[in-house]
Image (cartoon, coloured by chain):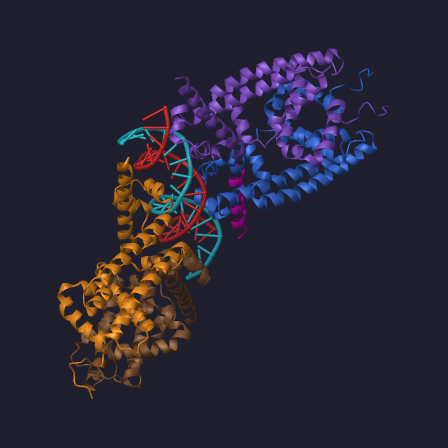
Chain colours: A brown, B orange, C purple, D blue, E red, F cyan
Amino acid sequence: MDGFIRRREQKKEAIRRAALELFQGHGISRVSLADIAGKADVSPVSIYNHFGSKQGLIRDVVKWYLDRTVERYKAILDDHRPFMQKIEAIIFDKQNIMRSYSAEFIQAIISQDPEIKSYFETVYQEMVASVAALLEQGKREGMINPELSTETVLLYFDVLTKGITANSAIFNNPVHNQKILEQFSQIYLYGLVGGPNRNRP
Amino acid sequence: MDGFIRRREQKKEAIRRAALELFQGHGISRVSLADIAGKADVSPVSIYNHFGSKQGLIRDVVKWYLDRTVERYKAILDDHRPFMQKIEAIIFDKQNIMRSYSAEFIQAIISQDPEIKSYFETVYQEMVASVAALLEQGKREGMINPELSTETVLLYFDVLTKGITANSAIFNNPVHNQKILEQFSQIYLYGLVGGPNRNRP
Amino acid sequence: MDGFIRRREQKKEAIRRAALELFQGHGISRVSLADIAGKADVSPVSIYNHFGSKQGLIRDVVKWYLDRTVERYKAILDDHRPFMQKIEAIIFDKQNIMRSYSAEFIQAIISQDPEIKSYFETVYQEMVASVAALLEQGKREGMINPELSTETVLLYFDVLTKGITANSAIFNNPVHNQKILEQFSQIYLYGLVGGPNRNRP
Amino acid sequence: MDGFIRRREQKKEAIRRAALELFQGHGISRVSLADIAGKADVSPVSIYNHFGSKQGLIRDVVKWYLDRTVERYKAILDDHRPFMQKIEAIIFDKQNIMRSYSAEFIQAIISQDPEIKSYFETVYQEMVASVAALLEQGKREGMINPELSTETVLLYFDVLTKGITANSAIFNNPVHNQKILEQFSQIYLYGLVGGPNRNRP
DNA sequence: AATGAATGAGGGTTCATTCAT
DNA sequence: GATGAATGAACCCTCATTCAT
């Protein structure tokens, strides 16, 4: 009888996967349930049986996406990499860059549906706490200017992440990648004015 | 007979304004022509008489928006403010932050419609050239690390601008504004590691 | 002051001409007043000033077309050509064949609008009387089987004319034209079974 | 499960029937999907589910109509009636005369949509071949003037059929029917000049 | 007298959702 | 539990017609 539940969950997973991909690619409002059903090889009605409505599906998919993101972040933070690598891993989080996420999808995560909003805020607080802990460590180790408030640095990370995501086409271009990433690290570590290798007045 | 043309242009302007606002607020595909017509106090058909189709309206609005943005940038660059103020003015360009731009709208600017795309690219090249000239000046004056390629710095500006736009809610909050903006300047000028007022190893 | 009226009539004529051409080419219901106005280089509202409504224009155009057709027929009948040439001229009336008349236009002539219908019937009776007189002459001269009722022969003419109009593409093809027209005459003069040059049992 | 398919096909059939009738009566462009849906007692959207679009419905209906016509022709040709009866049956094919076919419908069969056009041409070639075979037989049996090319005779049939269809009101009138049909046979068999019962010069 | 602007009604089409099987 | 069929609402768009200039 376990096979029943497993199959059911496999179908739900297929629908989620199809929906996420299409939402990211074309924007939520331009993806119809028929599109999703077609991609997941399922009848549109099945989506109702599993998720109740399109909004229900969106909720489920966004939560699912957020959960996976949190897992990735936790994996990064719990790893034993050096401090700076963790910072970079978070800013350039590959999953975020790998594809040009439809802005409408990201927007859906943040606003509108109150249930999603509340779920997102819970998850976000959790993640903020983890990253904040990392930053404190960075300050103690002299890698981060202790005069900067944790709040500001978090915001800076967020700004960079979103800006990079919006420019994912460039950051994923393997030709530019090498040189740009190097210089980019210079900038966010040592600023526009100059890095450690430069004579300062 | 001049009144004719003036009235016509006023109506078109009203439609453009309403459309831009709604597009930015809700995303293009979720805004119906009836919505726009209602907000502009005009019959939906009038939009067709003026712009031909929804796509025609979108094209017109995006071009209009780009033109206004370019004007703002030019005003900033041609001004006689000190170098660093210009940099800040560009990064925090108030018009960009003033409202939570719908991601779908920005997306529309860049992709899809080939006419828009071509128009955007022309405008973009022009703007890049102007900002690049400013950066060269900054390097000569020792305000920008001359080891950084202009390309990278432009990209950094773009990332910051987009990231800030995506977080506009925070940056427009007058409570946070003061302190955060100050520290933010610290970061993008002197990096995470530290600024000029800090003892360096 | 005569110039005023003349100009007015010239514009009406231009509108009529444009309308007729478009009606014939695409069918009445698929031609918009804007199309006609554009082709006649006139504002759509002018059509209202001149003809009152689309239906008014249709009425006017159909009457105009009928009048011109009657004139052509009268010219043929009043001419001094030999009898058989007149018959052929009527059946193959070039104006009817010159272009693939939209069936919808012909249909409009006959049915629906009662005013058109009545006008058509008056004109038709007149024409029938003229052609009938010709047929009587033909019978007296032994060119037409006197056993055939005039009514039947008129109907036969009508059937041929309409059938030829419907096949105008073929009858206007200059390649086929020569041979086919020759044999066609054979058929309608001497029937399927055979002509005068053929041995009969 | 067979009931599913049967029901579906019944509904499609009902829609086809309603569409054909309306198309023939009023012309394609003047018939809305709502009209068809109303007549077939179906929701307009159902037409989309079954035929994809109005054009899809038109395609389907025309093909359906062509198929039925071919079947009727085949039945006539394969029958064991005498030669002349077959000829008459084809020219006066009752289905063609039964109602005043909208010219726009016939036009739709021939032109515009390339898929319909190609389908029609295939069917048409097939039918032409069959009728041509019949004509050859007619010539051998002395019923048709062997000097007439098969091509011309086919065209003559077509002209007659279309002309008769255009005059269906008269040919279906039971009062006229008897006498006219008789004389009509006289004409197309022995021509205007005269029949076998008549003294010829 | 003639035109540009504006509109109400209607058409084709899509889509989230429900119903019957 | 899953699917094919059906639908109401909404959207983009067209067009004959009227209004203001």
**Residue A151 % position (x, y):** 18, 74
- Verify whether residue D9 appears in magenta: yes
Which residue is pictured at 78% across the width and 19% down the height? D195
Residue D133 location (% of width, % of height): 76, 38
Q: Which residues are magenta?
A: D1-17
Left or right: where does residue C185 sit relative to residue C163?
right
* Residue C56 in the figure: left or right of residue C153: left
Q: Identify the image quadrant of residue A61.
A: bottom left
> Chief secondary structure of the magenta span?
helix
Pick the quarter of the image with the C terminus of chain A. Answer: bottom left
Verify whether residue B161 appears in magenta. no
Q: Residue at x 46, y 62 (%)?
A: A41
Q: Nearer the viewer, residue A82 or A122?
A: A82
User: Picture quarter containing residue C122?
Assistant: top right
Q: Is residue A126 visible?
A: no
Residue D155 seen in render: yes
Q: Is residue C133 above or below residue A97?
A: above
**Can you give x and y, in whole percent of width and height, for residue B106 in the image?**
32, 59
